[in-house]
């Protein structure tokens, strides 16, 4: 059987559920891994004098963004949080408390040179509500470098829709077929969130630490990049 180079959303969900149920891999641990790799992606490109604005929602993607915010604050970055909705779920709440204790500050209006999108996940439903949609529109008019966690908020495959205007996407665990519909200038990375090799083999998913031309994806290996550092360039935006 030919290995898959990317997954549709149902395949990805099935792989995640299997990893959780069969390997006792808790959501919180995968969230920590996701946030760590997001912080590393930022840290490899911007020094600690660079202010970071992290936008979060009330789900696991928001929790991953808050982990990254905590990590960056611990490394000395000025970190500002944009809470797009009330954070009342257990895991995101826990991550928010931790990020604030580490020095992140809540300030939705702060304009930072780097804007992180951890607002929504693949389970998002369109159309977005007013609060989320105004952030998506704002991202097209900002002079910021924009990085989305897992996928751009507002994007479910239609390149003509209004979604977060990302320069880079750090997707989790495996390449997603839906991301191939994004404009070609958006860089896509895959982060290891702790799912074991046996799960990839069970779901027949190809693994690589090199750029795969079939799906534009640049893989990370053990948390370290195998591609050159990206230089900030506003001309790469859509």
Image (spheres, rainbow, N blue to C red):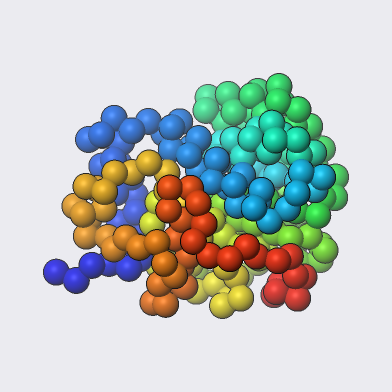
Find residue 179 and report its horizontal and vertical position in percent: 48, 67
Q: Is residue 93 visible?
A: no
Left or right of 97 on screen, residue 188: left
Outermost residue toward the right? 110
Outermost residue toward the left? 1
**Total marks drawn?**
0
Which of these two is toward me, 231 or 136? 231
Residue at the (43%, 47%) spot, across then down: 222
- Residue 146 location, quadrant: bottom right
Find residue 131 and report its horizontal and vertical position in percent: 72, 48
For the N terminus, the image quarter is bottom left
Left or right of 174 on screen, residue 97: right
Left or right of 197 on screen, residue 190: right
Find residue 218 and report its horizontal and vertical position in percent: 47, 65
Residue at the (33%, 33%) spot, across then down: 25
Find residue 10 and report its horizontal and vertical position in percent: 33, 56
Q: Is residue 54 visible?
A: yes
Residue at the (70%, 44%) spot, across then down: 54
Q: Quick check: 159 above or below 169?
A: below
For the C terminus, the image quarter is bottom right
- Residue 186 location, quadrant: bottom right
Residue at the (34%, 54%) spot, across then down: 12
Q: Quick check: 24 above or below 47?
A: above
Which of these two is toward me, 9 or 218? 218
Q: Quick check: 235 above or below 115?
A: below
């Amino acid at each position: 059987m030919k290995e898959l180079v990317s997954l549709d959303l149902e395949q990805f969900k099935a792989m995640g559920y299997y990893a959780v149920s069969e390997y006792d891999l808790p959501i919180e641990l995968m969230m920590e891994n996701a946030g760590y790799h997001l912080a590393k992606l930022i840290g490899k490109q911007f020094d600690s004098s660079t202010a970071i604005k992290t936008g979060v929602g009330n789900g696991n993607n928001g929790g991953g963004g808050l982990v990254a915010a905590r990590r960056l604050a611990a490394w000395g970055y000025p970190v500002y949080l944009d809470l797009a909705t009330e954070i009342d779920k257990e895991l995101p709440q826990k991550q928010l408390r931790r990020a604030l204790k580490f020095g992140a500050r809540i300030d939705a209006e702060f304009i930072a040179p780097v804007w992180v999108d951890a607002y929504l996940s693949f389970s998002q439903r369109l159309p977005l509500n007013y609060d989320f949609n105004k952030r998506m529109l704002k991202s097209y008019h900002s002079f910021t470098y924009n990085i989305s966690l897992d996928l751009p908020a507002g994007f479910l495959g239609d390149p003509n829709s209004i979604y977060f205007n990302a320069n880079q996407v750090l997707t989790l665990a495996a390449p997603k077929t839906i991301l191939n519909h994004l404009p070609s200038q958006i860089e896509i990375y895959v982060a290891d969130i702790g799912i074991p090799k046996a799960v990839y083999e069970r779901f027949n998913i190809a693994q690589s630490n090199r750029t795969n031309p079939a799906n534009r994806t640049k893989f990370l290996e053990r948390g370290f990049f195998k591609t050159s550092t990206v230089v900030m360039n506003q001309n790469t935006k859509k």
